[in-house]
Image (tube, rainbow, N blue to C red):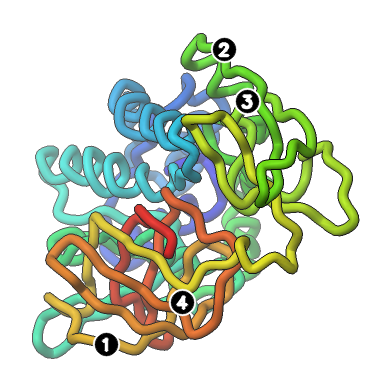
Amino acid sequence: MSGGVDSSVSAFLVREKYGACMGATMLLADDGGKNVSDARSVCETLNIGHEVIDMRENFRDKVIRKFVDVYESGGTPNPCIECNRSIKFGEFLTHAITSGHERIATGHYARIERENSGRYLLRKAVDLSRDQSYVLYMLTQEILRRVDFPLGGMLKSDARSLAESLGFVNAKRSDSQDICFVPDGDYGSFIASYTGKTYPAGNFVDAFGKILGTHNGIIHYTTGQRRGLGVAGKSRLYVAKIDTVTNDIMLLPETDSGLYARGVIARGVNLIACEKLPGNFRACVKTRYRQKEIPCVVNQTCDDEIVIEFSERVKSPAVGQAAVIYDGEYVIGGGTITAVI
């Protein structure tokens, strides 16, 4: 229970379904503060137990450290996915099981279904505006059988109304918008403070190497970025490439073909809907959380690699982000983008 509305309503729904449960709040990047207080208050309202679990060390090692490493290498990390993989459905689930609990529930907006064969499927939430199936593609069969997503069939507005009717202290609390450990959204300053390093300025260049201006250090920029570049052009410019060797950042206008890719290679593959993909598998893919799905052809070259070819060129897919494959409302699987082609 993060202290927010979604996990609080989930706790109520789980109590109603199973008759008994307890709440748990993970300490991650800070001391918890209001999050712990609000979560505890909701548990008291529901008359269920509440536990605080200190996971800060593992969060630093497995989530923050990877976030920094990917930015330093010129990529674009997705720390929410890594947190789900390593912490929420990793360490937290293990703690729950070893503590004698059979299942965990979270406030994610997604649905889990079970086929007659016994295989578990991951489906988009009813409220597509809140759907979080993209950041859950890494869930394995073993994890899916032990997880509930009580909000998967609800609208966000209904969840908030239910929280108000139950008198939850956080019923009107706004949703968090930024990465939890960088609440002000200034990733570059956070990385510099975290590592204690100085990241040198370098050149913004065009496709021919012509200098367009000066950047403030590569950690302040990400592939596809348009805002905050401080470089004027005849048309809007976007970050097309970050070269960690030369310390140059290439900028291209939106109309330049160099800004677009015909496909990606992804590794660290997890498949949910099947054990292995057939050749030339036709599906849709998202290469960023808020991106629209793009028709594609997927080929699984080995257990841990997929090659995805888009039906149309896609602007600025980024190394470090996830490529998640969908068949309609169902997540087939996905992996981390390691190359753009």
| Side of 99 where 263 appears, left or right | right
Of residues 258 and 320, the one nearer the viewer is 258
| Side of 294 where 279 appears, left or right | left
- Residue at label 2? 198
Question: Could you tell me the amino acid type at mark 4?
Answer: Gly
Q: Are marks 4 and 3 in contact (CB under 8 Å)?
A: no
Tell me how far mark 2 sits from mark 3, CA to CA: 9 Å
Residue 130: x %, y % from top left: 56, 66
Of labels 4 and 3, the one closer to you: 3
- Residue at label 4? 153
Question: Could you tell me the amino acid type at mark 1?
Answer: Asn
Q: Residue at x 61, y 18 (%)?
A: 200
- Residue at label 3? 217
Tell me how far mark 4 sits from mark 3, CA to CA: 44 Å
Of residues 160 and 127, the one nearer the viewer is 127
SS at badge 4? loop
SS at badge 2? loop
10 Å neighbourhood of mark 4: few (<14), some, or many (≥20)? some
* Dot 2 or dot 1, earlier in sequence: 2
- Residue at label 1? 280
